[in-house]
Amino acid sequence: MQANIVVLPGDGIGPEITSVAQNVLTAVAKKFGHSLSFDEQLIGGIAIDRTGSPLPEATVAACKSAQAVLLGAVGGPKWDDPKAKVRPEQGLLAIRKALGLYANLRPVKGYAELLDASPLKRELVEGVDLLCVRELTGGLYFGDRQEANDFGDDARAYDTMVYTGREVRRVVELAFRIAAGRRKKVTSVDKANVLASSRLWRAVTVDVQKQDRTGISLEHQLVDSCAMRLVTNPGSFDVIVTENMFGDILSDEAAVLTGSLGMLPSASLGEGTMGLYEPIHGSAPDIAGQGISNPLGTVLSAALLLRHSLALEEPAAAIETAVSKVLGDKVLTRDLGGRATTADVEKALLSAL
């Protein structure tokens, strides 16, 4: 297979971690007889500095013509003015919209080699294998809003959470399709006791289950109690599906199960095979350029890229096996309690492949 992948390194540690993932992809493609080409483009703060836009038109055009997109991270103190009209994070929202990506998949796995790195008890984390499916195009992040003109007692600001039946249905149906290949259990998370948008979410989800013929078990859970259950009984989850903001918060909370945000990959998917793949952590500007960042979340995102966009299951599994080997050999960066550098982890990954 030949495929073109757009790489968006972004800001902070983004260039460091995407470089490792790109080298791993090149190595595994060669091993299995495939050819991958890479096209580096701008997004985020560096794009603002060079073009005035967090998502230049050239980046959008390149992404639309590629088979998949690999993203590092965006943002940093340099652009962290809440009053700024142009912000790095706008690039993320815009690229998801431009590519029609409506669902974010965030797998959370309790690696045996990292059980003691988690702040939770070993017996709680052992065997955890869950997937968060987060809706990406609706909710508070995209609804009508009004900024406050000042910060006095009478200042007023609002954000609006809006969902349509179609938006809910397509992401819940995707969660059901994924669950059919796993343990056939879906937990739909909402706040239906308070929010009108959540009551629509629950009604549509119930209807999706009525149409299901694969034997999926469905349960509903309020977001606050789900947050508690994630740290008291994480092994009880299989596939969690929820709206945009709830998914953003819950999936970051679930990262504690692995011991580090640096371990979690993600895939943002749309109707076709195009996908955008990125680690869930931020740009970590405090360690950028020091060569100590953990690239494994990005490398695991590259494995998801091979699996979901290129249908290359064997190379994807090879990367995941290599990650397990690196963890087993205790080649660990500081966030995982070790002293390995980013370059050490890259060398170990390539050796394992």
Image (cartoon, rainbow, N blue to C red):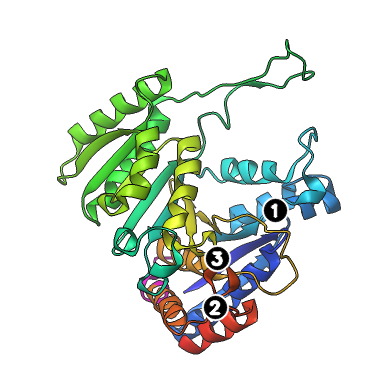
User: Which residue bears the numbered disc 3?
Assistant: 298
**Mark 2 vs mark 1: in front:** 2
Q: CA distance from mark 2 to mark 3?
A: 10 Å
- 94 or 247: nearer the viewer: 247
The tag earlier along the polypeptide, 2 or 1, is 2
Is residue 115 shown above or below 224? below
Q: Position of residue 249 (x, y in %)?
A: 49, 42
The tag earlier along the polypeptide, 2 or 3, is 2
Q: Spot the residue most to the bottom.
A: 351
Residue at x-position 53% and y-position 75%: 25
User: Which residue bears the numbered disc 2?
Assistant: 24
Neighbour tally class for label 2: few under 14, some 14-19, many 20 plus, Cα within 10 Å: many
Q: Position of residue 278 (x, y in %)?
A: 55, 58
State the extent of the magenta-drawn residues as a range. Answer: 310-316
Residue at x-position 55% and y-position 74%: 36
Q: Based on the displayed image, in which of its 4 quarters is residue 315 positioned?
A: bottom left
Q: Position of residue 77 (x, y in %)?
A: 78, 50
Neighbour tally class for label 1: few under 14, some 14-19, many 20 plus, Cα within 10 Å: many
Mark 1 touching mark 3, by CB under 8 A? no
Is 302 left, or right, of 47 in this rendering? left
Is residue 329 shown above or below 55? below
Mark 2 touching mark 3, by CB under 8 A? no
